[in-house]
Amino acid sequence: MVIASFQSAILLLFFPLLLGPYLQTAKLCSSSDDHKVGCHSIEKLALLNFKKGVVDLSNRLSSWQLDDEDCCKWLGVGCNNVTGYMEKLDLHSPNYMARLSGSVSPALAHLKYLKYLDLSYNSFDSIPSFIGSIKELRYLDLSWNCFRGRIPPQLGNLTKLHHLGLSQTCFSAQELQFLSHLTSLEYLDLSWLDLSRTGESLQHINRLPSLSELHLYRCRLSYLPPSTNFTTTLSVLDLSDNYFDDSIRLSLSNFRNLVVLDLSHNNFKGPIFKAILNFTSLQSLDLAGNGIQVPIPKAIGQMTSLRTLLLGENDLIGPIPDVLANLTSLEFLDLSYNHLEGPIPLRFGGLCKLKELYLSRNNISGEITEFVNAISSCRPNNLEYLQSSETKLTGNLPYSIGNLRSLRSLYLDNNSMNGTIPKSLGQLAELEELDLSLNAWDGEITEDHFENLAKLKILLINSDGKPPKPLFFNLNPNWVCPFTELLFLDLSTFPPNLKTLGPLRVIDLGENRLFGNLPMWMGKRLPYLEILRLRSNSFSGFIHENHCLLHSLRILDLAHNGLSGTIPHCFGNFSGMAMIDSTNPFSLSNWVAGHELEDQVSVWITRGIELEYNGTLSFLKCIDLSPGEIPTEITRLLGLSILNLSLNHLTGSIPEMIGNVQGLEVLDLSRNQLSGSIPPSISALNSLNHLNLSNNNLSGRIPSGNQLQTLQDPSIYAGNPGLCGAPLKDCATHPNSHGINNEEDEGGFTWLPFFISMSIGFVVGFWSVSSTLILKKSWRYTFFRFIDNMNDTFLIFVAVRKARLAKRFRLGRNFSAQRG
């Protein structure tokens, strides 16, 4: 009995110790109902004070309310289940529109137990030094805020910190000594900070013995210390987009345990390969965007741990080595934009883990048939991206292409492939992007080619137009297109089935042999269409008012067709062109840039001037039409960037309010029959950089001022014999500008109405005074008495001044005589 009691006492004594580890490993709760302790009032007030100093346009912090007792349930807040103290505050912005701005309140210093603080992707103006007093922090991310001032040195007090993100913070990085105190740091991101002026910056990083991941993207660095403390611990090193060259290869050779190495977009030429070929643990190597001018070394086939190999955008020469097929773990391979030649190794068919293969813009050749048969033999097949545009591949696209069931993107455009396109393409249910354009395809395209392509967003299929046969689209008129998400379309025909593609945003059917009237249904069936390019076809008829229902249009190009009639006045309804700017972060430009379609839509030929709009497509609004009068409603399109109405039969005058279109960069009205004067408001087009009004019947003085002062090429006004003024002949000597007949000065001032009004004013004023003096005798006496007095005063003034001048003259002459 005594023994049992003793055992019970011992159990009670050590029970808390046995339970302790479970209490310490209690999970954090974030907006959950299973925690037992509510948040502490001092921490709740700290968050509310923080909220007061924040501008929250998207109302992200709407759950932070005083009357809500438990702040542990608030957005971004995480508390310890047992103690109730706040340990996590995650306020990173999920997108551009949800950014928080303003100041960071010192009240956050009351969060003494905070371990995780993420304020990244916001717009806070500064980070106060009190951050250094939250000494329990393990994770701190301040990235992508443009803070003012310097990095607070008090961050060096955070000795328990494991993760520090300071990329794109606009800090002055002249003082980085605090880094040497963060001895527990494992992750450091200083990307976008200018470290070129801090000669010892890397030495401070060198003192971090636990560092395993280092990001120094775009830090303007060109030097790497020859020895570092973290060479044995570092597994991820990002030195991309700096000024490093082959001289750092000796320093790099110390990083034997690297798993990820990014040296892209530097100045390496070739010897860099020797420094990294012995990195047997390397899983990801990125050397893209350098000027490497050597063949791919065969020794790279020994780096069998590689999963990612990115060598694109270099000047690599020679054949693609077969030894790359030894890299059986490879998932991503990019060899695009080089000078590689020869066939694609058929041994690539053994790379069954490969997900992405990029070979575009090389001199590689050979039969596409054998290559596709090889890579489609893997079971299961993991290939998702296959891009080999602008190479020299020949042959037929085999039926086995349908075995690449995981394929999401297929680009084989601008090659020398021929034959028919296999119907097995219709089995690629995951396909989102398909570009087979500019090959020598023939035969017909039927609905079977698109049977299961419900996810398709980009479709470009047209032949190069060369004999013997063009590609023929034989689609059932009643067939409903399965691709409900299609955004970009470039075909060699205009199938009526397009009316079922409501989400379509881009139609490019230019330079085909299309004829007939413009489809009337487009305006009602394609509400999201932003780009319509039908130039250089044989369309006839007129532009119907139904086409004005394309409210989202940003680019409209109907040039070089046989259209007739006038430009509809409803063109002012294009609200997509009426917007001066776009604040939508998910704009068409971002989408196009992400899908490598700049080449499809970025270059527009505007009658002799080539304009490139790369990466700004969503802000480009363009009209290129034929013919009729220019409707005044077009001046309501305030966001219009390009207006090209040249080489039509336009009559009438240039709209007086053309200056309202403030975003206009290109205005081409040449080779028409426009008459009248150039509106003075044209001088308000401050963004104008290309103007062509030549070969019309315009007359009068050319306006000047602002941006027009920079457009001094006389050819832009040539062929208008009635025009005068800079940069043409002066209006005073112009044969058609005698007198002042309805001319304007350089500022657009009209003289004839001025002189008419001045003459009328003189006559009215003269006879008003004269009639009063004639009818009023007393006024007449007073007026003439005033004139007599003024005459006497003037004569006396002249006499006095004359006497004084004579006296001064005599004194001056006597003084000169005495000095002589």
Image: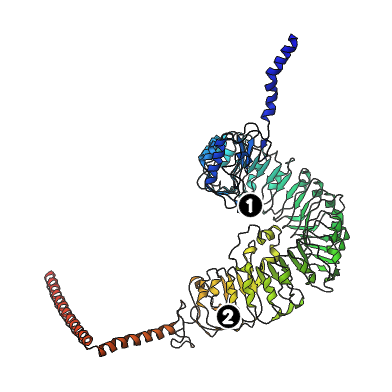
Image-based side of 43 in relation to 375, left or right:
left
Residue 777 shows up from this direction: yes
Percent coordinates x, y for residue 784 in the rendering:
21, 86
Percent coordinates x, y for residue 381 in the rendering:
84, 51
Residue farthest toward the top in the current orientation of the protein: 2
Going by the numbered disc 2, the residue's amino acid type is Ser
Q: How is the image coloured?
A: rainbow
Identify the residue at image location x=73%, y=65%. Answer: 504
Residue farthest toward the bottom in the current orientation of the protein: 774
Could you say which quadrant of the image residue 473 lies in? bottom right
Q: Residues within 10 Å of mark 2 (few under 14, many from 20)?
A: many
Q: Earlier in the sequence, mark 1 or mark 2?
A: 1
Alpha carbons under labels 1 and 2: distance apart: 48 Å
Identify the residue at image location x=75%, y=75%. Answer: 519
Residue 684 disc label: none
Percent coordinates x, y for residue 71 in the rendering:
60, 40
Between 429 and 238, the residue placed more toward the observer is: 429
Percent coordinates x, y for residue 98 in the rendering:
61, 51
Going by the numbered disc 1, the residue's amino acid type is Asn
Q: Secondary structure at mark 2?
A: loop
Between 386 and 71, the residue placed more toward the observer is: 71
Q: Secondary structure at mark 1?
A: loop
Residue that mark 1 sits on: 95
Residue 694 disc label: 2
Image-based side of 69 in relation to 385, left or right:
left
Q: Nearer the viewer, mark 1 or mark 2?
A: 1
Above or below: residue 520 compared with residue 54? below
